[in-house]
Amino acid sequence: MANAEHGGRPTEALGATAVDGTRARLRAARLALWLLAAVLAVRQVAAVLTTPSGERLTTLEAWVGPEGVLHVRGSLYDSTQFTGTPLAGLVLKPLTRTAEQALGWGWTFGTLLLVVALGLVAARALPQPVGRRTAILAAPVAISLLVLSLPVRNTLWLGQTSIIPVLLVLLGCFAARGQRASGALIGVAAALQPTLLLFAPLLWFTGRRRAATATGVTFAAVTALAWAAMPHDSYTYWVHHLAGVGLGGPADSLANQSLHGALLRLGLEGPLEIAVFLLLGAAVVALALRRAVRYAHDGQLLLAVAVTGCAAIAVAPTAWQHQLLWVLLTAVGRAGKRARDRMVWPVAVVLVMTLPAKMMLPNMEFLYPVRDNVVLLAALAAATAVPFLSRASRHFRSPVPTPYAPPVPARFAFVPLLPFLRRVLIRPNLLLELLLIRVTYAAYAKVRLAATGGSNSAGRARAEEHGQQILDLERLLHMDIEHAVNHAVVKIGWLRNFFDFYYTSFHFVVPLTVLGLLYWRRPVDYRWARSALGFATLLALVGFWLYPLAPPRLMPDLGIIDTVHGVQDFSQPDYGTLTHLTNQYAAMPSLHFGWSLWCGLVIAIIAPRLWMKVLGLLHPLFTAAAIVATGNHWILDAAGGALVVGAGFGLTYLLQGPRAATTVVAATEFSSEPSAPAKDRTPS
């Protein structure tokens, strides 16, 4: 009764309200995720169906002849598009009279339904027990990731059947009733992708020997059936293809993410390459099966299946992109005893399987062997190296928690603080941080490159029109000093060289150095500073998109001398638009100045000595002089850069609250006051 009188409602009612609120949020999150999955699916289907005939479903069209699948003139493998087994062509016999119609809506939507089924089976196969939140959200998240993945997108685009073997294996392991039915499904999958026969020893060593036997028998039976119906194509596949020749393209193509393809790209050929391939393949199979059996006995059968699938990718003669879906399934494994390390592997897997390799690693020659084989390396890591936790580990469900600063709201208390921006008191995982920074920068570069406002000629005209608007505004404000400063600097050789060097060299070096020092020496402030920089860059992208602007050096009648790039030929109609490196019209706001101002403010706030603060603030001053002297920016571009940086710091404060260092000091001082009642102290 006391609780009812003083609190306004009984304790039970308060608890029920909290539970109802949690359930409502989960229902809303689930609905949002299902809507996202639906939008992604519709987008992928629309992208395929709106592509002109002849440019889509090219693999499926290879099966269609004047009278259907089984009457193609010559061999199925005369086409460079078809890479499946003879059985894959045989199963289309019922479609011989309606193959043309199946190439469109029916085939595409049928593939999409297979993807949905695959996501549902994978979500239900998560190792038990799973939390209520995971159980509710797993299915839409799985389907969304599958639809976004490169293997599924390529399958939809090409008209491949590579979803079917994966789904058959999962159905055989998690849905089939009885070992014979399970083995039969996996045997059919192996007939479509022969290296999936690796699942037979997995079944055998996990005590499902009838299923293993049924797998072998089914594989032999359906392969013999296809051989009897299509002997020439069967000989081509089982002799020439499995000898490493490759179907669908050269075996050393970058698209072949198998050990065989990687060794060929590294320059190995002939008997030496075959010997190395067989030796490495045997080692991968032995390690992967040993790990998979251990995970299966541990109750993580989905992870065991994914690890075995990754080994099948590595040891196949060719593993084209549409066949690499097994790597994505390894995201269910848990690696890392600390909470800050737990997301490294799933994030890396999702990025590898959804983004082009060029977005994962910089365009540096010494990184090409890694970049060209990034999916294979992920498969090898999952199969042989990643230390996935056992369910018996005390860290499997409860990783070492990350320490956070006390939750102190910002001045605007009506704005909710974002949980993912909580003030962490330790440095984040370095590998995950570098990966996210690289991918974020690659996305930034692509968006900046695309922000032209239309075609090349239209983009240039619009950008020059905006340039004239900026010049007119500066003249109105009596601050149009770009021409005078540029020509004055050009006359002084050492000063021109200094500003050219400063413009081209310090733009990336200084921000990366500041971030590195913060990460190593001031981890409490690192996330706060990084968030401000991220918000500023995001706002700048909006500016590039909405207001493409020609810099002074690209205004034909202004007479600005381009000190960095040299004399330009303005008679070229495509000059100044998109290049392979950057968008020349992304001038407003100036991130050259914006990033330098961010560096100066961070140093001024955090640096312990006055001379350090002064030195930090000199950097944006020198940068402002450099961007004007070299003709690369207007004065107002620098003002725009300052505006987005200020907004970046403001958004960080608004959504995250005060800096972690500030809140920690405040909480420490507050908690040390003896007179403060316990109920009023800031929780830690």
Image (cartoon, grey):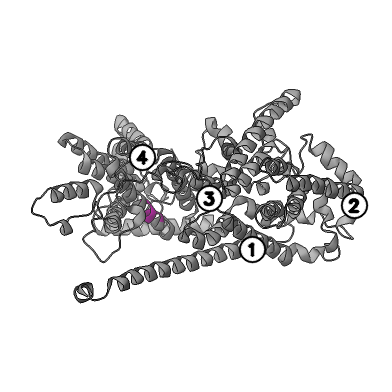
Could you tell which of marks 1 and 2 lies nearer the N-terminus?
A: 1
* Element assignment for label 3: loop
Residue 106, located in which quarter of the rendered image? bottom right
Q: Amino acid at mark 3?
A: Asp
Q: Which residue is mark 2?
A: 73
Q: Residue at x 58, y 32 (%)?
A: 369
Residue 222 percent coordinates (x, y): 84, 50
Local crowd at mark 1 within 10 Å, few (<14), some, or many (≥20)? many
Left or right, 407 with respect to 332, comes to left
Q: Amino acid at mark 2?
A: Arg
Task: Tell me the distance, in whole angstroms, between the alpha carbons under discs 3 and 4.
Answer: 27 Å
Q: Which residue is mark 3?
A: 574
Residue 45 disc label: 1
* Element assignment for label 4: helix
Residue reaching furthest to the left: 675
Relative to the observer, which residue lies in front, 334 or 214?
Answer: 214
Q: Nearer the viewer, mark 3 or mark 4?
A: 4
Q: Are marks 3 and 4 in contact (CB under 8 Å)?
A: no
What is the span of residues highlighted in magenta in the rendered image?
A: 537-541
Q: Which residue is mark 4?
A: 507
Chief secondary structure of the magenta portion: helix
Could you tell which of marks 1 and 3 lies nearer the N-terminus?
A: 1
In the depicted structure, whether residue 633 falls above or below residue 384: below
